[in-house]
Structures are given as structure tokens and as C-alpha cells.
Amino acid sequence: MSAATLKQRRSVLTRLCDHQDAMGDRYGDIDYRMPTAAFIDARDAWAAHPGAADNLIKTVRALYKWAMDREKIDYNPAAGIGIINKNPKGGATPWTPADLRKFKKRHPPGTTAHLWLTLHAFTACRIGDAVWLGREQEVTRNGQVWLEWQPRKRGSAFVSIPMLPPLYQATRSATVVGPTYLLNEKGKPYASMEALRRMAQLWCHQAGLEDRSSHGIRKAVAEMMAEAGASQHQIMAVMAHTQAKTSEVYTKGAERRILAADGMQALKALDW
């Protein structure tokens, strides 16, 4: 398990411990031999954020599996709990051009929210990397500024991409400069990936985009590259993927649309 994943799960479990049941009892103060219904109630309490709710159950399930393997408990109360994500097979909902316009209208250039969106849109980075990326990762090659970094997700490939003008301009429009591009209201780097994630959820909420996320931007970037004719290996290089099958999850729909559009050209010759 990577350090980022461990940190995320610790954050989830800390939040779970602070959750209260119908009687007002804090979960962290209740015996760990809790019934399945207790965790279903906690999941449902987070239903406004389906991804977070499902991640809660995934984390609890892993915790109790660890305990079972060490014979500290003889059952896993989260084992049979289903997911509630509205889009489980496709993962995060990809952003549309309309979503981007709506977000940018609410969060104009010069705001941290706009920089957050621009950083994800022009790097396709994960939020676990967005929280620490900054000018230290910039490299100049033949007069062009590039971003180069090793993603912190285990198994990811090294990323080296040119900084396109929108991203370069967004990073230079910040009034406060720090070790990371994204700084909180105190001018400091966000304390954790979860802290940035919560702020991103607020920005999306303010823009009327309740079910959008940073991963949805990443997915949209991959689809747009595929529709623009980028090869599988080009997409893999940007997304830090080491296996083609991983990128296919993002690009399969776009590739099918391209094939369908080409296929429909054959019908133009029909005398209808």
C-alpha cells in the first residue's frame, strides 16, 4: 500500500470514528464488533458524495479483513455491503465542455479554484500529485517549460509534459507563490490530499457541479485526447500508465465514437 493510500484510509477512518449513530454515540467509542447495519447507516450518511461513501466501505472492509487474518475478529461486517455510486462501471463522471465553462464562470482566472481546474486539465494529474506539484518540477528545454514528476501512485510511470500556455499563465497569475502551485487561504500548501479534495468539492458545489471531481477531469482529458487522434502510447505517457489496458478504460468510448463516425461515412453513398 502506498503512503498516499495509507494516508487517505487513515483520514477516512478518522472521519468514521467521529460519526454518530441514531443514539448520538460516537462510532470511535463503540466496540469494534459492530453489526453490518451500522456501517450501512454510515455509508448512507455520506450518500451525497457516492464516491466517498463507497470508499468508506472499501476502507472498512480492508480493515476488518486485516483483523480477521490476525484472528482478532471472526467476521467482516462490511463484506456484503454494496456500492451506491451512480456510475460504478465508468468510475468518475467525465467533465463536459459545458461543465468547464460553468466552473470557470464561477471561478475566474486568478483564483485558486481556476488554477486547480487548469492544473488538472493540462496535466491529467491525480489529486494526490496536484497537492504537491510546483515550480520545483519545472524544467526548461529549448526555451519550452516542461513539467516532470514521478507520480506517487505505486506503479505509475514517470511523466514529462510541456506546460501549455493556459497552464503556464494560470501558475503565473497567482498573487502568492509557494513551494506548490495550489495554496490554501493562508498561503500554505494543502496539508493533505484529502484537504485539497474537500476544497475541490466546495468549489464544484459553488459552481453547481455536485457530482464532479478531479478524477473526472482526468478522465475527460483522456477522452478528448483519444477523440483528437492521440495514439494509445501518447495517452499512456500523459496519464502515467504503464499498461495499455489501463488507458483503454478511459479511451474506449471515444475510440468507438471515432470508429462509428468513420463507419457512417459508408452510408453517405446510399441513394435514399
Image (tube, grey):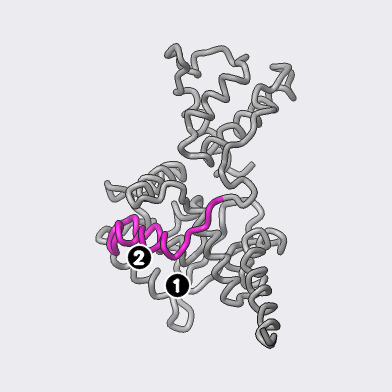
Q: Is residue 122 left or right of residue 252?
A: left
Give the magenta range.
92-118
* 106 shown above or below 84: below
* 161 shown above or below 18: below
Q: Which residue is mark 2?
A: 171
> Was residue 109 drawn as part of the magenta stretch in this picture?
yes
Q: Which residue is mark 1?
A: 163
> Was residue 247 drawn as part of the magenta stretch in this picture?
no
Q: Is residue 115 left or right of residue 10?
A: left
Q: Position of residue 58 (x, y in %)?
A: 62, 35
Q: Position of residue 232 (x, y in %)?
A: 67, 71
Classify mark 1: residues with Cα within 10 Å, few (<14), some (14-19) or many (20+).
many
Tell me the quadrant of the picture where the N terminus can be found: top right
* Residue drawn 47% across the image and 83% down it: 142
Nearest to the observer: residue 239 or residue 10: 239
Q: Amino acid at mark 1?
A: Met
| Residue 4 figure quarter | top right
The kind of secondary structure element at disc 2 is helix
| Residue 167 figure quarter | bottom left
Q: Position of residue 241 (x, y in %)?
A: 65, 61
The kind of secondary structure element at disc 1 is loop
Q: Are marks 1 and 2 in contact (CB under 8 Å)?
A: yes
Total numbered badges shown on the rendered structure: 2
Nearest to the observer: residue 199 or residue 147: 199
What is the CA distance from the residue labelled 1 to the residue labelled 2? Answer: 10 Å
* Residue drawn 52% across the image and 66% down it: 148
Q: Position of residue 74 (x, y in %)?
A: 73, 17
